[in-house]
Amino acid sequence: GAVVSQHPSWVICKSGTSVKIECRSLDFQATTMFWYRQFPKQSLMLMATSNEGSKATYEQGVEKDKFLINHASLTLSTLTVTSAHPEDSSFYICSAGGRTYNEQFFGPGTRLTVL
Amino acid sequence: AQKITQTQPGMFVQEKEAVTLDCTYDTSDQSYGLFWYKQPSSGEMIFLIYQGSYDEQNATEGRYSLNFQKARKSANLVISASQLGDSAMYFCAMREGEDYSSASKIIFGSGTRLSIRP
């Protein structure tokens, strides 16, 4: 099946710094990608829909100025956590749809720890 | 708004037994799709099975089958002959939208932690 990669796989940063997470579709083009966050022992919560060439669509309650999403090409979407704080520590997962509606490919996730 | 409900936070099953993981959903759309994913401790999301709202037959993929009861809005996952490697979190998820495509977002249930006893 199609492959979605994320980089980095884990990151530790100091409070107040910004962190960028990359999501790449390796062998297919993805006009739409999704960003989720997952707290320990909880479900995946959709944060935003990333659209190539246009602004991301954020879910209710997600601060768009804090979680900046850029989908600059058909294979790359980035999530930047700005001025990170310890409460932003979480597992961030991206996904991309395939050619048909029954396909959805997930990246391996990025574990963010903010000290 | 769409909603996915998984009422079993955790389950213990003896190896080689069959297990059913419950999932109910709520949607006002006629076109939607239901997914089941497995998430081991490594965190990766592993696709297991898909059922479309218009599919007349229950989906099957190897040891996985989906018991789709449209009128009851349920989409239970059945794992036959469970194995130790089946121990993981299992999530039911749904995709819907007027533009029903791979660009439509997927929403997840709260998950069920399945533990297989040797």
Image (cartoon, helix red, strand yellow):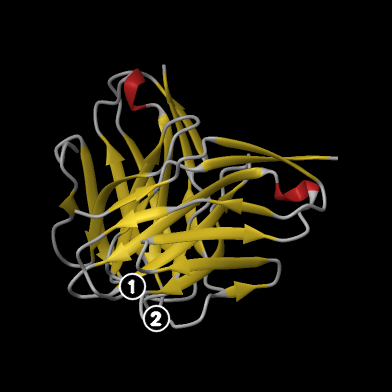
- Against B26, residue A74 (above or below) is below
* Label 2: few (<14), some (14–19) or many (≥20) C-alpha neighbours in 10 Å: some
The image position of residue B88, as x and y in percent, is: 64, 43
Residue lying at 35% horizontally and 19% vertically, measured from the top left: A86
Q: Can you tell which quarter of the image residue B95 is in? A: bottom left
The image position of residue B57, as x and y in percent, is: 50, 81
- Against B83, residue A8 (above or below) is above
Residue lying at 54% horizontally and 42% vertically, measured from the top left: B112
The reply to whether the C-beta atoms of the residues labelled 2 and 1 are less than 8 Å apart is yes
Asked whether, in this view, residue A53 is left or right of residue A77, the answer is: left
Q: Secondary structure at mark 1?
A: loop
Residue B38 visible in the snapshot: yes
* Location of mark 1 (residue): B102
Same-subunit check for callouts 2 and 1? no
The image position of residue A48, as x and y in percent, is: 24, 50
- Against A110, residue A82 (above or below) is above
Q: Can you tell which quarter of the image residue A43 is in? A: top left
Identify the chain of the residue marked 1, using the numbered disc in the image.
B
Residue A25 visible in the snapshot: no
